[in-house]
Amino acid sequence: MKQDFIRNFCVIAHIDHGKSTLSDRLLETTKTISEREMQAQALDDMDLERERGITIKSHAIQMYYEHTDGKRYTFNMIDTPGHVDFSYEVSRSIAACEGALLLVDASQGIQAQTISNLYLAIEHDLEIIPILNKVDMESAMIDEVSEQIIDLIGCKKQDIILASGKTGVGVKEILAAVVDRIPPPKGSEDAPLQALIFDSVFNSYRGIIAYYRIKNGVIKKGDKVRFVNTKGEYSADEVGILQMSLIPKDKVSTGDVGYIVSGIKESKEVKVGDTITTTDNPGEAIRGFEDVKPMVFAGIFPIDNDDFEDLRDSLEKLQLNDASLVFEPETSVALGFGFRCGFLGMLHMEIVQERLSREFDQDVITTVPNVSYFAKNTKGEKFIVQTPTELPEPNYLEYVEEPFISAQIITKPEYIGTIMTLCMEKRGNLVRQTYLTQERVELTFELPLAEIVFDFYDRLKSISRGYASFDYAPLDYRQSHIVKLDIKLNGESVDALSALVHREKAEAFGRKICKRLKDLLPRQQFVIAIQAAVGAKVIARETISALRKDVTAKCYGGDISRKRKLLEKQKQGKKKMRQIGNVEVPQKAFLEVLKLD
């Protein structure tokens, strides 16, 4: 059978453990990419990925390998991101594979995302090939890290492959292990077509190109196909396989990873996790991926209201390529029409803003991130509050309920104290503390979701030196003393900077934002008062002094009364300017205000 010579696998690891470099060596060794075309991070095709040195998107590619038994094998490899904010990309890649290369940096050992991604792979019954990467480094701790891997996955020491993405050591052993250890895909070519969509991209000339993995059946050029969940029916204008570019084929068979072009222009007609089947012999839908759980919600608004529809199109096209982005329309008094978007974390939010700007030429303003609440007014009506403007005034408000989560943090025992301090500071309660091994402990906390929105990830990563994996599940809504914090510039509220915060945190949060705005807002010809207020009570204030134009520069010599007259005239002008002057908040300030320490 043809599929006995196919192997589907992904590369998983913590951020910066060398996935992309090792993928480059695999491409070179199998001669998938010529020396002339070779560049670092060959599979990372976004400028953003190269600039930051991180993988943001999963990348699928087909390679051919001559095994020692003289037979030729087809490898479908998916290189995945390592950052926690892009773990959804990893879960989709894992669903399309039978095996995984688990990379561990020999100088850093097992870290947070190594554990999270490994659990994802084990849940899907993937065959794990452990690889110790960067063994050529002077700081490599080969024996200690090997012991960690043996403790984590229960393998034998001889199962661990020692490799170096930089020098190419161990690459041939990895390719041989893929053939010997990873099982070929199951499924039958004679069964009805079942192809799982794991990614899609928008091409302005050809429409939407969907990437899929065939579980059963065969897809041929010209077939009439149906997308099971969206119920759309199309013609397969072009099918093929994924290499450094798209390679058209007459048919793609069971076990293979490929693409389909069917002239779809509407992004809502293709959903990641959907199943493709044929109309004349339809198959059942394959169970897709877990639902995405947004962590951070923020409003995204176009700078010019006329660009609202363009922004909607851009977000839909971006969602095709990034299924973890969720959005719905919303309006703001200060900013007009825009969208309320859900992100997996602050880095994800930053990347989405950056991609909107670079790929779609959309300059946007982002509001302060927050979560959804339930509120009950004095009339007894209960409703959802998603933005600060929707919260009634205190005299009409009976209570507010905020969402709580059950958070699991896996870390090393030496970081328990600092992590507990952080969670207590974030209004958390410790529920359970379990030692998984001597070197790994699991802490379970109940935390308000609003407290993990801002800087929780970054602080958790820094206090645990990157060695803490974090996962959560929604619990329930509980009554809390939530207030609306208004930011005022010269007495005018800026609703895009308003936030819903706990009463105890309001003053500290208000001070931070005022201080930040003082550093970011450009000075004007008049004094600017920046205030943070809860209701009518001002709880923090900063003042930006006026720019002083030297109106006396033209006076040389003569009586002092001439200078006084000019200064008095300037003083009157400034008073008038302050009354009618509008404070313009530059876009940079909106973005920077969010990066609170």
Image (cartoon, grey):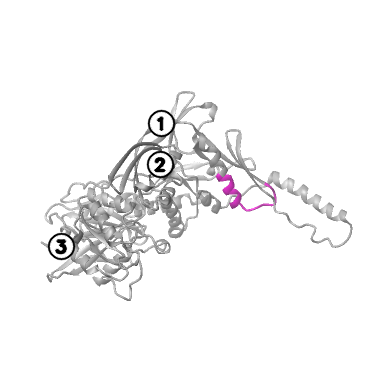
Tag 3 residue: 180
Quadrant into which the N terminus falls: bottom left
Task: Point out the tag, 3 or 2, that comes first from the N-terminus.
Answer: 3
Query: Is residue 513 a member of the stretch shown in magenta?
Result: yes
Q: Is residue 241 left or right of residue 460?
A: left
Residue 376 placed where, x, y %? 45, 27
Q: Is residue 373 above or below residue 198?
A: above
- Callout 1 crowding tier (Cα within 10 Å): few <14, some 14–19, many ≥20: few
Magenta segment: 512-527
Q: Give the amino acid at mark 2.
A: Met
Query: Residue 420's mark?
Result: 2
Say if residue 575 shows up in the picture. yes
Residue 372 placed where, x, y %? 43, 37
**Residue, far top:** 379
Tag 1 residue: 478
Say which element carries label 3: helix
Separation of residues labelled 3 and 2 (CA atoms): 45 Å
Q: Give the amino acid at mark 1.
A: Arg
- Report the residue at 30% width, 71% height from top: 167
Q: Is residue 372 above or below residue 466?
A: above
Task: Point out the tag, 3 or 1, that comes first from the N-terminus.
Answer: 3
**Quarter-of-image position of residue 418:** top left
